[in-house]
Image: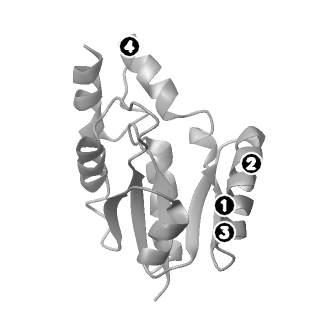
Amino acid sequence: MSVAVYPGSFDPVTLGHYDIIKRSAKMFDHVIIGVLNNTSKTPLFSLEERVNMLKDTVSDLDNVSVESFNGLLVDFVRQKNTNIIIRGLRALTDFDLEMQMAQSNRMVAPDVDTVFLSTSLEYSYLSSSVVKEYARYDVDLNEFVPKCVVSKLLDKMK
């Protein structure tokens, strides 16, 4: 059974993230979305809120699960008995950072590989930061985040 981990902070999950999740779910038997509890950042949504929004978002995908994790990604990947990390790339600038992280992961965990998926063109500009900025200025968010996220994000921004 092929299992892959798609990690991120997902603060909040966007339609770009969902695109990568759906495409990954077609490529692997099981995809685990790993929601990072990064103690060095202050997210807009709590860890529990982010996990719950993702569970709602992927409820139509039978082979996708959502879990939170602390610590090193490679440790989480190994705990899940896999060696595959999925990362989405929006632009060339993403590639530099993602390649550095993938190579760093390979240094500490040579058995762990990273699979890069380029974001669909319609979401190539989209990030959680952009979405939060749009929410601050009452832009219609339906083209950017799953429906289950829209009201939660607007409530947070009030």
Residue 94 higher or lower than 7, as above or below: above
Q: Indicate the secondary structure of the residue bearing disc 4.
A: helix
Disc 3 marks a residue whose amino acid type is Val
Identify the residue under disc 2: 95
Q: Position of residue 80 (x, y in %)?
A: 41, 76
Question: According to the image, label 4 marks what residue?
Answer: 136
Residue type at mark 1 is Phe
Q: Residues within 10 Å of mark 2 (few under 14, many from 20)?
A: some
State the residue position of label 3.
108
Q: Are marks 4 and 1 in contact (CB under 8 Å)?
A: no
Q: Quadrant of the N terminus?
A: bottom left
Q: Quadrant of residue 31?
A: bottom left
Name the residue at the bottom extreme. Answer: 1
Q: Which mark is residue 24?
A: none
Vertical relation: 64 (above or below) 78: above
* Alpha carbons under labels 4 and 1: distance apart: 31 Å
Q: Earlier in the sequence, mark 4 or mark 2?
A: 2
How far apart, in angstroms, are the residues tagged by discs 1 and 2? 9 Å
